[in-house]
Amino acid sequence: MMIGDWLDIGPVDQITPGNARTLPVQGGEEIAIFRTKAGTLHALVNRCPHKHGPLSQGIVHGGIVTCPLHNWNISLTTGQALGEDQGCVPVIPLKVDAGRIFLLREAVLGKRAA
Amino acid sequence: MEFHDTVRPAADGEDEMTVPASDARMHLVVVGNGMAGCRAVEELLARDAGRYRVTIFGAEPYVNYNRIMLSPVLAGEKSFDDIVINNRDWYADNGIELITGDPVSAIDRAARTVTSQSGRTVGYDKLLIATGSDPFIIPVPGKELPGVISFRDMKDVDTMLEAAGRGGDAVVIGGGLLGLEAAHGLTLRGMKVTVIHLMDTLMERQLDEAAGWLLKTALEARGQTILTGANTAEIYGEDKVEGVRLKDGRDIPASLVVMAVGIRPATALAREAGLDVNRGIKVDDHMVTSDPNVLAVGECVEHDGNVYGLVAPLWDMCRSLADGLTEQHSGYRGSVTSTKLKVAGLDVFSAGDFSGGEGCEDIVLRDASRGIYKRVIVKDDRIVGAVLYGDTVDGGWYFDLLRREENVAGIRDLLIFGQAFASGGGAVDPKAAVAALSDDAEICGCNGVSKGQVVSCIAKGAHSLDAVRSTCKASASCGSCTGLVETLLSLTLGDDVESGPRTMCKCTSFTHDDVRREIVAQGMKSIPEVLQRMNWSTPEGCSACRPALNYYLLCAWPGEYQDDQQSRFVNERMHANIQKDGTYSVVPRMWGGLTNPRELRAIADVVEKYNAPMVKVTGGQRLDIFGIRKEDLPAVWADLNAAGMVSGHAYGKSLRTVKTCVGSEWCRFGTQDSTGLGVKIERMTWGSWMPHKFKIAASGCPRNCAEATIKDFGVVCVDSGYELHVGGNGGIKVRATDLLCKVSTEQEALDYCAAFIQLYREEARYLERTAPWIERVGVDYIKQRIVDDGIGREALRARFLFSQSFSQDDPWAERAAGAHAELHQHIAEVRPMEIA
């Protein structure tokens, strides 16, 4: 794995479980990085598919974040809106290595979102 | 990166080796006399005993022992001899040369030799690295002080036993398995133990929040102090350890500190030898490293991106390794791990992936009275994970289903009850199973209610869950039999079941009122505790129940309950109002709607300094500054604080504003000092958390310029005193207030206001405004509690003021001083370069 493919965002413990932090991208879309209470990490574009609410500010429960603006539930793993709602937000591939968070560079820069 | 081989001259120690001339067998040298190294040799011997000549180097001065059993040795349940796996005879009988207390310090791959610390050089044909892992030492000041140890080998146990002999306080840093085992052992040995854990959940890699909470409660009952969410700042002491200081300033004295925060693959030797090393030493499916003559096995290796720290994968690896060394290549395919263990005598099991996620469904069983929690995670009709606490007998069965990826659709409804129930008798339809129960089968264990009693109670007219609960008490306590009672209702009545009051959310069959009553009755003081005791069907709750539970707990236990920020809606977490573009609006408090030049200047300065695009006068007589970015909030608050202003709580389910008119001080019609009263009411009530937002107004005469009759609590001053109004609302559905009563003094107006607010706080459901609440319970009920019952009123008022004594700290000031800075700062920023 070439190091150059992944961006080192810093240590995992910068995000307390159940919370999210934001990652602005110059010339691109801001990313929200979530850490669930179960300890898993996920990154999504920080924009609800509904009315573009900042998902990073929502309540995280299980593998779901609830958008702070209108309570849409978004899956942290697929970016899909759950329940009756329809929509999807890009997921940024993320890996954790030696306690640090890495995001797929090209997805961060908006060239490819999975 | 290390791709260049370090080529050294051929070792000159060749003649030191004592190779019998007759022994022409391949020489296998094993670096590491631990569980992996010896197991690999055992597997090899079992396949082809004579094939290799074997030499084993061990760093410790012992024969091979079972590292996992160090905990029972510490606890005094076993001796060292009990945990020896292979004694000296085994080495001798199998012709293995064992070199203990002399770790290998270098590998020369070109010359195919290893050199030990003492300078002994041995040649090899095949080299097996089984160096295991090293404890991770957190880089805090004082980590080198005498008395600070890890928990990895027999020497550490000896140090702990020696310290325990002197008694006193011990601190264990790390609430994982190893840390908790150390804590348990030291507790049994008579030390007073505090466990410091960085995460909110103990053993968070093996357990979810619910199981972690049960474990924490059980350990606390055994006298340990468990501090979760605790971050170690430093270990202090003069010439030996004296205590641990946390980042929040807490200070815990200790004569022994055990660091058990984790392990890291011990890869230094391999790295220096130029082998491919990532997190661990990289190996293929046959445990061969980047050098075909060097193999590696155990905790020090990385296979297919995975590093393992459990014993089961290690056994799998050793089998593949031995197969490869005897040319029967089988290939290691990675391990799915499960953890079944006793932590301090408590049964815990976890397997697979329990983090949830898309398509995953949770099946949860909680038995509060027996302290049992079971959670099975199913995806596409297959088990993908399981967490069990208290009763782990079915762990192996779940793990087996998981590994075999068996379709569980057919037994899904009974899955959670375990193998005996799910596989027994073919009664796969739970409804049929319930129908087949005899009349004296117990349905509700808490209240001892049989099936016959439930059915007869339904026959007598209890046609809803709630009616059953209130008549025969079945499912009225812990609620774990709710499903059974519902099945009985539908069996008995068919479609005639009446749905009861709405449950709190999809996570529970209880209503808001049930939950509140039980929080107080059972003395429950945390969200995980409520979820467990009331049998929540989801592991963490959802965005509907968590904020409600947080409020109910806060209301029930003022000053005692620790607010859970993660259960708060964004506005309450950020202490500002989120707007559609993700920026925030900021409303400083203006007591009773009064302001002064200093405050106005400070607000004007903030608007300019932070380029706020809009500032607006609100309906509640405040100024609202729009367009503030979350990063700027603390600085904005600092500026407003400096001018004497505090949070206006325009964002909270809390007291919002007290709107006033100018009253008798200026107005020619004014009858009383409504402005002064409004300020006093606001001083008394600000900062209080409520079921929903709460607005107050005080008008100086019946012309009612402050619009007091559409507020949650309104005062209309008249010549002879004060009319008190309740339950108004100017929102979607306009509702004029009901007149509560008339009082003659300002103090009475304040007292009744406090009592009314407390009644609302204690009895309304979360997110229920006063208007629908009063419509539901009736204004007569409110009058009876507030007006007729003087003693009750006084008690309500006292409870409100007690609660207020904990809630009137300005949240802005804390944030401006740096609290929760992570909520306001980005984790990082990406500035892409052209050559990306």
Image (cartoon, coloured by chain):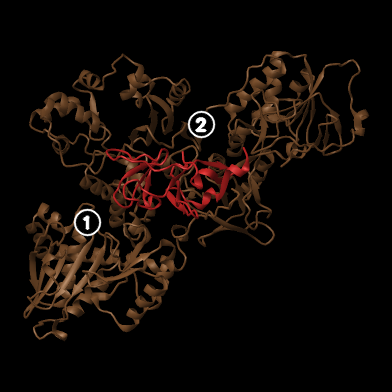
Chain colours: A red, B brown
Using the image, name the chain to which the residue with label 1 belongs: B
Res. B644 in view: no
Indicate the quadrant containing the N terminus of chain B: top left, top right, bottom left or bottom right: top right
Q: In what element is the residue under mark 1?
A: helix
Mark 1 burial class by Cα count in 10 Å: few <14, some 14-19, many 20+ = some
Q: Is residue B295 above or below residue B634?
A: above
Seen as rendered, the residue at the extreme front is B834
Mark 2 element type: strand
Picture coordinates of residue B116, whole percent (x, y): 82, 36
Amino acid of disc 1: Glu
Q: Whole-percent x and y of residue B35?
A: 66, 29
Q: Please give the label number shown on residue B193.
A: none
Q: Are marks 1 and 2 on the same chain?
A: yes
In the image, residue B421 above or below residue B267: above
From this viewpoint, is residue B223 visible? yes
Q: Chain of mark 2?
A: B
Camera-nearest residue between B311 and B626: B626
Residue at image x 57%, y 26%? Answer: B334
Q: Which residue is mark 1?
A: B762
Amino acid marked by disc 2:
Thr
Residue sitting nearer the eye, A99 or A72: A72
Q: Which residue lies under the disc numbered 2?
A: B339
